Amino acid sequence: MKHYNKLVRPYLIWSILIVIVPLLMIILYAVTTGGNTLVNIQFTLENFKKIGEPIYLDVLKKSFKLGFISVAFCLVIGYILAYFITRFKDSTQDFLILLVTIPMWINTLLRTYAWISLLSDNGVINNFLQLIGLTPKELMYTDFAVVLGLISDILPFMVIPIHTSIRKIDPSLIEASHDLGANSFQTFVHVILKMSIPGVINGVMMTFLLSISTFVIPKLLGGGQYMLIGNLIENQFISVGNWNFGSSISIILTVIILIGLSVMKRFDREEKEERDER
């Protein structure tokens, strides 16, 4: 036991330094005022009240709007993709999931610049449209560009949990459904879709939280005119220098993420209990 404690101690100290201390600093800045030097600070809740101002409420609305749109497309595309992956044998499924996750290995900034080269006025898509005699379209700095970038960035986080849930379904349940006279559509709705709901919930929560907290994609594909929650936090810390307000927004975003994680954990626990009962 003593040997185990010695091994754990460095990781514990490191976790405190890079996680606990910064988090406590963010909480302190969020409930105080007086600048970013912690000199002559005063405790207040005004930083949290400030988020209720119309300009910041618009940021929240825009973030949730684009987040919901991105998640909706990811859910449809991700479920179809995950479902068809499960139709293959196990070794092929592992390879296909690997292909899905490969984009995650590439830095988000590089992937976003790749979309810029495709969507810009002189990009690949508009050059192709001109080549076939069509009028070039304004694709950059639009909702379409931002949503497209978000979908490509978060789609794997929708596919993987849904695929995991579908893959865990006992094939005998599907066979029993057919034996009882259900057609393929009825079997899908009442067996596969119903039993994959925990994976769907996890995928929706993960992709939604990622979509509203990112700041690179809206900044580059939106041309700076798209201010989402992640961009607002970055702006308060880097450009404005209002660490107190930026910290309060970070706390709010953290609470949203924690609520999402608790929902995901609850559905994971219920899924495990259902498997144990079966």
Image (tube, rainbow, N blue to C red):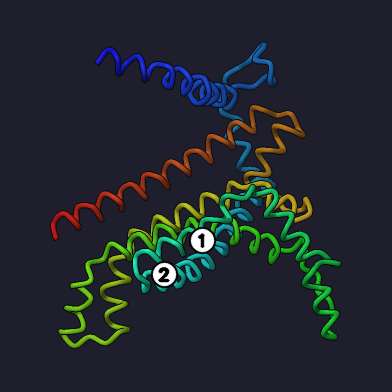
Quadrant in which residue 179 is drawn: bottom left
Q: Is residue 202 above or below residue 122?
A: above
Which residue is under mark 2?
A: 85
Q: Which residue is found at the position 45% from the left and 61% from the top?
A: 97
- Find out whether the residues at labels 2 and 1 contact each other: C-beta distance under 8 Å: yes
Which residue is under mark 1?
A: 100
Instruction: Please give left or right for residue 224 compared with residue 7 in the image.
Output: right
Q: Which residue is found at the position 67% from the left and 28% from the top?
A: 243
Mark 1 neighbour class, 10 Å CA radius: few under 14, some 14 to 19, many 20 or more:
some
Q: Secondary structure at mark 1?
A: helix
Q: Which residue is found at the position 29% from the left and 69% from the top?
A: 194
Instruction: Please give left or right for residue 123 compared with residue 191 in the image.
Output: right
Measured in 3D between alpha carbons, the distance from the residue under mark 2 to the one under mark 1, in whole angstroms, is: 10 Å
Q: Amino acid at mark 1?
A: Val
Instruction: Please give left or right for residue 14 compared with residue 201 in the image.
Output: right
Q: Is residue 181 above or below residue 136?
A: below
Quadrant for the C terminus, please: bottom left
Q: What is the x, y in percent for residue 155? A: 53, 60
- Which of the two discs, 2 and 1, labels the residue nearer the N terminus? 2
Viewer-nearest residue: 131 or 74? 131
Q: Amino acid at mark 2?
A: Ile
